[in-house]
Amino acid sequence: MPATTTVRLGDLQGRPVLAIDSGRRLATVEQGLFHPRSFNLEGLLCVLDPGLAAREAETNPSSGVYRLLALTEVIAIGPHAVTIPSAAALATPGNRPALAALIDWARVQRQPRPWHRAFWSPGTRPAAGPPPEVCAAAHPGTGHSHPPGTSPPPRLGGLPVITEEGERIGILQDLVVETRSGRLDALVVRESTLWSYLRLQPALIVPAAQVRSLGTDACVIRSRALTFPPAGSSNPA
């Protein structure tokens, strides 16, 4: 049995999506779609490459450039690319309402793309807001991609990390997941002090077994027995 591999969700942004049947690059990963209750990576939000987006627009102008890729459709999340069987694995948001509900569409456009990923992933960023077909499929007539009276999924990055005893230990920087199952493997937590950044304080890796909840206002973990590694050291995640 192959060894279990993991990836940080933040490292997925900008990773190309390649089709096995054609060897073509079809899209670029915009973000991982992590479910805060199941503690699972459910899929990926992707943006079609400009050439393919133009061809798709000729046959279906309303489909937009966003595509959703369920984890069950992924062959592998590799260090340099995400591989899928064919272009058929990429679904329009309207055809994947459960995945679309994990996206805060207003925030997608405000996420700055790191300069090195923007260089290797040319193309213009799509217009802000949820695609019309998402609103129509999820909640007809409302103009929203989430049920009336509910909020978009919580933004996990930047959440304060609190112990069961009520002690704040830092802020959530990233999530580490298993590439095959999508299960949460660990949290990447940083101290929220300027001094920790000036000292280049390494991140604290919190195993998934220590996590109680990922909510809208805080991430709660079981114990404060975890301590940050000393400055100058490194961690494997």
Image (cartoon, grey):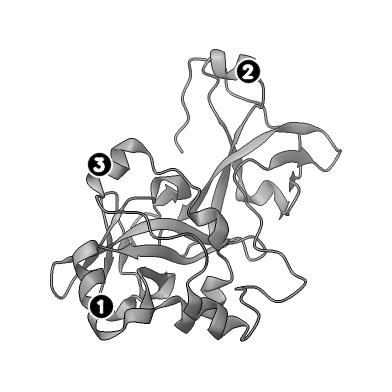
Give the CA distance from mark 3 to mark 1.
24 Å
Q: Amino acid at mark 2?
A: Leu
Percent x, y of residue 82: 30, 60
Q: Quadrant of the N terminus?
A: bottom left
8 on left or right of 143: left
In this orientation, which residue lies closer to the viewer: 119 or 222? 119
Q: Select label 3 or label 2 by which is in front.
A: 3
Q: Amino acid at mark 3?
A: Phe
Q: Amino acid at mark 1?
A: Glu
Identity of the residue furthest to the right in this view: 165
SS of the residue under disc 2: helix
Give the CA distance from mark 3 to mark 2.
30 Å
SS of the residue under disc 3: helix
In this orientation, which residue lies closer to the viewer: 157 or 212? 157
Residue under label 1 = 56
199 on left or right of 227: left
Q: Which mark is residue 119?
A: 3
Residues tagged 2 and 1 counted as in contact (Cβ below 8 A): no
Q: Earlier in the sequence, mark 2 or mark 1?
A: 1
At 60% across and 73% down in the image, what residue appears?
145
Residue under label 2 = 194
Identity of the residue furthest to the left in this view: 22
Q: Earlier in the sequence, mark 3 or mark 1?
A: 1
- Whether residue 38 can be seen here: yes
Percent x, y of residue 59: 25, 85
At 60% across and 18% down in the image, what residue appears?
196
SS of the residue under disc 1: helix
Question: In the rendered view, would you say 189 is above or below 21?
Answer: above
Give the CA distance from mark 2 to mark 1.
47 Å
